[in-house]
Amino acid sequence: MSQSPDRPLPTFSARETFFGTDKTGDAAISIAGVPMDIATTNRAGARDGPAAVRRASRMAGGTYPDLWPDLYSLDFADVGNFSLMMGKLEESLALIERQALEHDHLISVGGDHLVTLPLLRAAAKKHGAPLGLVHFDAHVDTWDENYGVPVTHGTNFRIAINEGLVDPKRMIQIGIRCRVEPEVWQWTLDQGVTIITAEEVHMGNPADVAARIHQVVGNQDKTYLTFDIDCLDPSCAPGTGTPETGGLLAWQARSILTRLGGINFIGMDVVEVAPAYDVGEITALNGASVMAFYMGLLAASKSQAE
Amino acid sequence: MSQSPDRPLPTFSARETFFGTDKTGDAAISIAGVPMDIATTNRAGARDGPAAVRRASRMAGGTYPDLWPDLYSLDFADVGNFSLMMGKLEESLALIERQALEHDHLISVGGDHLVTLPLLRAAAKKHGAPLGLVHFDAHVDTWDENYGVPVTHGTNFRIAINEGLVDPKRMIQIGIRCRVEPEVWQWTLDQGVTIITAEEVHMGNPADVAARIHQVVGNQDKTYLTFDIDCLDPSCAPGTGTPETGGLLAWQARSILTRLGGINFIGMDVVEVAPAYDVGEITALNGASVMAFYMGLLAASKSQAE
Amino acid sequence: MSQSPDRPLPTFSARETFFGTDKTGDAAISIAGVPMDIATTNRAGARDGPAAVRRASRMAGGTYPDLWPDLYSLDFADVGNFSLMMGKLEESLALIERQALEHDHLISVGGDHLVTLPLLRAAAKKHGAPLGLVHFDAHVDTWDENYGVPVTHGTNFRIAINEGLVDPKRMIQIGIRCRVEPEVWQWTLDQGVTIITAEEVHMGNPADVAARIHQVVGNQDKTYLTFDIDCLDPSCAPGTGTPETGGLLAWQARSILTRLGGINFIGMDVVEVAPAYDVGEITALNGASVMAFYMGLLAASKSQAE
Amino acid sequence: MSQSPDRPLPTFSARETFFGTDKTGDAAISIAGVPMDIATTNRAGARDGPAAVRRASRMAGGTYPDLWPDLYSLDFADVGNFSLMMGKLEESLALIERQALEHDHLISVGGDHLVTLPLLRAAAKKHGAPLGLVHFDAHVDTWDENYGVPVTHGTNFRIAINEGLVDPKRMIQIGIRCRVEPEVWQWTLDQGVTIITAEEVHMGNPADVAARIHQVVGNQDKTYLTFDIDCLDPSCAPGTGTPETGGLLAWQARSILTRLGGINFIGMDVVEVAPAYDVGEITALNGASVMAFYMGLLAASKSQAE
Amino acid sequence: MSQSPDRPLPTFSARETFFGTDKTGDAAISIAGVPMDIATTNRAGARDGPAAVRRASRMAGGTYPDLWPDLYSLDFADVGNFSLMMGKLEESLALIERQALEHDHLISVGGDHLVTLPLLRAAAKKHGAPLGLVHFDAHVDTWDENYGVPVTHGTNFRIAINEGLVDPKRMIQIGIRCRVEPEVWQWTLDQGVTIITAEEVHMGNPADVAARIHQVVGNQDKTYLTFDIDCLDPSCAPGTGTPETGGLLAWQARSILTRLGGINFIGMDVVEVAPAYDVGEITALNGASVMAFYMGLLAASKSQAE
Amino acid sequence: MSQSPDRPLPTFSARETFFGTDKTGDAAISIAGVPMDIATTNRAGARDGPAAVRRASRMAGGTYPDLWPDLYSLDFADVGNFSLMMGKLEESLALIERQALEHDHLISVGGDHLVTLPLLRAAAKKHGAPLGLVHFDAHVDTWDENYGVPVTHGTNFRIAINEGLVDPKRMIQIGIRCRVEPEVWQWTLDQGVTIITAEEVHMGNPADVAARIHQVVGNQDKTYLTFDIDCLDPSCAPGTGTPETGGLLAWQARSILTRLGGINFIGMDVVEVAPAYDVGEITALNGASVMAFYMGLLAASKSQAE
């Protein structure tokens, strides 16, 4: 219900860009859609995630009672959607990486979770590998293959670890509760990845989870945030491809995220928003809120630096 | 699944009035629909809230295991929907106030939250100003304007305070988590309003929240209850115009409300139910349940007085 | 499935502007959203029409087998949504008119049908009154009042006729089948308006209807086209506020529209798309198609002039 | 968009009774809901038909351009929903018949098509058997059993014929296109029933169909009208239990019905509206429109008699 | 995202049987659909529950991080749907019981909750009466009648207790929060049934609830599990017939169920999944997850026995 | 509502296989799902088409009043879904072709329209190239590339023609109305393909269209039928990826198809059913009906041969 100076239109009249911005390029922060969804193992449609999150983000930008600086204090642009090769996985991954390299601090909206792989490849090139990783998800995404296919939205982080893009000792997964073979689970732990299951979040306290995240990734070294919307419970995020029951509630994600101030974030993404299965835009709104919280952290950091 | 003596029809066959009543006037308690929704900043459609809540209320009336007297022990009527002037805000506010004055104890279903303003004006005339206010909401609704417009569903309580309808020191807001400019936030606190954010509810305990409400409004002086359905999390209430993530869960609202016995309530409303965005009637059912809990409090109070 | 040279992105990756254009101003043709919907007598939500039609229009631009010149041969821009005063009807009408005057050839997407009134006022000022009017609708929209209110989405054309914006003898309504009082019906005929009921369209032939339109408005004098999406049958356009059974099928509208070449159109609008009631975007797609057919007529006319 | 003198509220504010009436009894014409749906062979939910049609009927009452007398010229009441025994078929049929006998001219909204059987039993008792029958449907409903059960929504008219409630020589079915065993088809024809398939309607002309109906049932003897909403194409009536592709379009039903003036109708029903599968209320609206056309015929007949 | 050896197809390509099995008979565990829904007091459609849960179950089978043995280590079959007599309650109950007797360890998906009555009758015959009962539900289901009908989905457990199928002292209800007459409540307690209300679950801890269940039913004697999906909050399970606000969250049900290892379960059912009111399959997925957790308990038990 | 001897279960209880068959292999006719949808240019989700059509087909099998032999007179099996490589287009095409070769007469349900390419490759190998092609579609699908990609659901028939799988002189397209570049249009005509636009169908008569099909493909040589569900109007088939307004109505498709008796069909497919955008299963039901009509033609042909 709040408004920034450059948004005099009511929400319903605002342009459907990320947070209603009119800026389309040349900004400190670039927000892009990455509508690739051909690597999903179950329901399709994450290609429509960027549009849905754009629309919902008009309801999400501003200052929150936690009194952050306004996210509109940041210099950001909606750079549109990335180009893709329809039906061509490898070519699309290369295209995504190439386009991601054109931006300094990139916030992306998927697309399925495989898009994070080329985004991490680009981030590692830009910012130096390996990166820390804060990873919200229902699924570990460290399979060695899914149904006979080695590059999917379930193998992305095994590849990222194997390529040295991510430091598994500075990698933490929050919200995990998927079916998973014991050897995949063990491999993940063996790399040094920290896993906080959804039940641990429910039984515990968001502040403690946030403290654990700070502990794992540190505030010094560069860190990437990836938020698979299916880390939320299907009641909060029905609009996704592989929902799992028992997930985080929206308030828990919010309370954890807003306590991550000080981490040296160099990029983030929200993935797996599939609006065809959503109701009342609530999944998209959760995606947009996550972006707003992340941008609030950046705004606070910028404000402290000034 | 329970039934009152005058409702021998299965739920699916019951007349779609509030709690299935056949009474249309001349009762101690009047329940009315107020289908005005032209003051919303985002999604439209709260005009259809009264019908949806009527329908859902057939599933909500009766005695709960907390062993209240049956709400059917109250003398209440469904007085229908209020008249409005389409597209005419000021005229409609005047019409709503005038119609509200015809009823002693009025329970209303909006419409957008601006309908509470004329309802408070009428209540203040009937019952004496200023009133205490228990206000469930995601939004403070104390803006001085929204997008250049001074009378909207986001400025209603600033106006109510400024008009002296409500005593801000006896006003408490529960569930707040909206974007809000620091000066609006500060103005609200400066008036003496008590704010309990959604995170405070989640981190705490419904019994403590209820105790805080008792403390702020007291049990002696007259108090009005307004329940914006968007105080609930979008997972519980997708059918609303300006959803905000991270809200109260249905059980929390229920556990708080059922602990408000003894407060001297003289009227209440449920607002911002927009069924076009709902699924499986769950938003409407939450609206109806809130009414049922309020009426349960009245029934208990009546039973104790007898 | 076709593409213009400046649209190398797959449909699902294209920017959600009208027909995917990147141009936002300074074009021969301006396309705008006019998200006002507070004058509706039944279901709300036409404020979300512009966004839905923008999205759907990405599927509708190009060359059709009828071998029009590509609509991308036109110089057009998506100028965004008009500013409005929430809940303020008269002020909003004035604002719409003022903004419409800034554009030479304006294509608009409503909003409810009342938006056509200020659009006609602006068109009459720009192009000279009275204008011819090709009016697709289920409803005559020539009431003298609706439910006690004189300026609504059902009185707009009586006002337009009374203000001399439209020449009723050069006005033709296609698709009419609403409930209507005999005196309203007679008044409309008495002004000289030609009415083709939906049944007449069904019993006849699109080519004959098109011929009748040519006959009524002529090819010489300036003419405005207004397309209320509820002229279509609810099966084709469920996403609207006041559906009426028995309407035009999409193919009939298409076959009529594509035969209107030569008429001197100076502006058009599509109104009453309310996406909250739509399924699979079909109402929005029909709205976008109607715009594409209109722009195809302009492209053909431009091509012949060259 | 029109209004009767006693309906000064905008559509969205009108009480959700049939055509918005406030009358609940003692009228020349009674309109009732009959929410029984336990005899369906496929999708459930017709029990919610009466509520949906009530709501939609607020958009359907008035005078149409065909210049009928206003249906509000009739004396009619919404008598509510009939009582039923949950899960008890035979008992429910007896209850429906008993309640139907309390009304002179009854218009009913089902419920599944089996409700027509007790309604015909009551009509035959009141008005004398056998009755003529105008039967719109996708299905012949003259099976001798369905899946081993002899009394279902698919055997109702064989029973009605066998009980002598209906004169098969004065019975005509319009819109038939279901799967049907040759012996059931032949039995139906052998009784003397006239069948007009959906394809015959599409290939022909509504006026000719209406003429055939007049010819079969005559204008003298008493006739009942039963309208199974699935006679319409699923595009017009998705909200039903056993949809069949290739059905009548809404305009065809309308054009046929409005040409049935002069037939001596003594009752009618609309059945099989299952709103859980509907979109934008279009199925319910078609149901309400059919009732409005029927009541328009009665109003014309009354007006001619006066 | 995991897979069993015999399921090499991606989730979206897997056959829509329970957990994708190809086995249709002759297994240690039989899974069946019981699509009877004619005993519901409110919304219909649980007949479509089996199909929806089958589909969703393809996403739910495998090993969970709690490191159960894979449910695919069990020998189970999808034996299809049970035969029923449409619209015939007593006959259908007899049919269900007779078919249930053909299976040793039966897992069923309803249908409404009345199906549990014949399932318990069969289980008692097979395994000896009385059985212990773990009963998740919003409703006590111990009414003596509903709306004048003695055998419904709300009277099933009074009948089961009265028939001696269930030992009320070994019966525990979790999640109760319905409207209920004091005498029904008292009768239930008087039999010795343990009731844990939804609020008690929310205010407490899943581990404590699980401990209480163990205490009531014991690990020795035979016990049946019945899970009415409406024990979950409507946000988690909108797709059901009689939703009640304030229910269990999916994670709570999961955390309770996975702590029930050691109980001597001899059968279970999930009932009241009504997909017509669901969104994004979340209700069905919760139903499938509950089955997966139950089967995980069986797999762990089998693994320990080996 | 009819039933075959081996289907004694009510529709809602029948197994969700194609037409409820229990047969899974070794039949004269094989029906398979081909859930590949990664080649779509717009909305995703056709991978869920096979499941939706299976479910709907339970409502579609039997004998129609046109008195075909029962489709259950055919020997057919539901052979399940084909294996695919997720996100791998070329590999998936090879897999589909290989699996198709295992069946003599294959009826397939897509998936997007690209699946027809490997199905034609297999059919040509089995039955000899080139084949005749009856092609229902909104789109010509003879592009040389889409958005820079040469193998998509829009280039499939150019490839098929270029590979000599199809004889363009024996190829007829019905329902075309898409945007298309003049050179693509001309290329198609230049090959000898016959195009009947949707408008030509609307302006003409199904019997004439059927006659034209007979004339083009002949009754002697082998012919394949491919039915893209988007040839239907979006009102009849909202559940598809690239809807186009103005399409065929369900009855027209039915009336054309049932007049194709005598053509020497050796295989067919229904593609582009994307249930996430459907309402009330109507798109899926149209898909199932088309299959039923095709199988009816086979049954008639078999009956005549006997």
Image (cartoon, coloured by chain):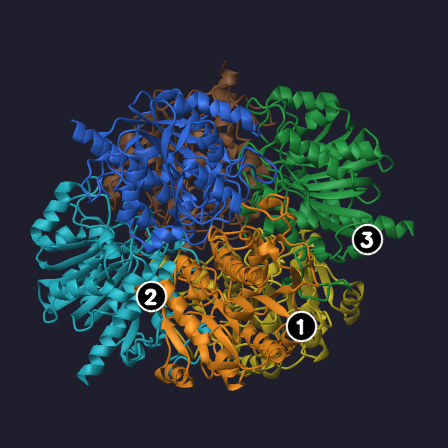
Chain colours: A blue, B cyan, C brown, D yellow, E orange, F green
Q: Give the structural element (helix, strand or loop) at label 1.
A: helix
Point out which mark residue E99 bears: 1
- Circle 1 residues within 10 Å: few <14, some 14–19, many ≥20: some
Is residue A222 rendered to the left or right of residue C221?
A: left
Give above or below for E66 relative to E82: above
Q: Depth check: give the residue in front, B70 or B105.
A: B70
Give above or below for D87 relative to B90: below
Q: Depth check: give the residue in front, C72 or E142.
A: E142
- Check if mark 1 and mark 3 are on a common chain: no
Is residue C26 rendered to the left or right of residue C7?
A: left
Q: Which residue is mark 2?
A: B288
Can residue B98 be seen here?
no
Q: Residue furthest top?
A: C306
Quarter residue C50 falls in: top left
Quarter residue C120 falls in: top left
* Quarter of the figure with the N terminus of chain F: bottom right
- Circle 3 residues within 10 Å: few <14, some 14–19, many ≥20: some
Point out which mark residue F74 bears: 3
Q: Chain of mark 3?
A: F
Residue at horizontal 82%, vertical 40%?
Answer: F263
Q: Amino acid at mark 1?
A: Gln
Give the Cα separation between the discs numbered 2 and 3.
54 Å
Q: Give the structural element (helix, strand or loop) at label 3.
A: loop
Q: Amino acid at mark 2?
A: Ala
Could you say where residue D19 lies in the image, as x and y percent from the top left?
Answer: 43, 65
Could you say where residue B124 lies in the image, as x and y percent from the top left?
Answer: 12, 64
- Circle 2 residues within 10 Å: few <14, some 14–19, many ≥20: many
Quarter residue C15 falls in: top left
Could you say where residue C16 lies in the image, as x and y percent from the top left?
Answer: 42, 32
Q: Amino acid at mark 3?
A: Leu
- Check if mark 2 and mark 3 are on a common chain: no
Q: Chain of mark 2?
A: B
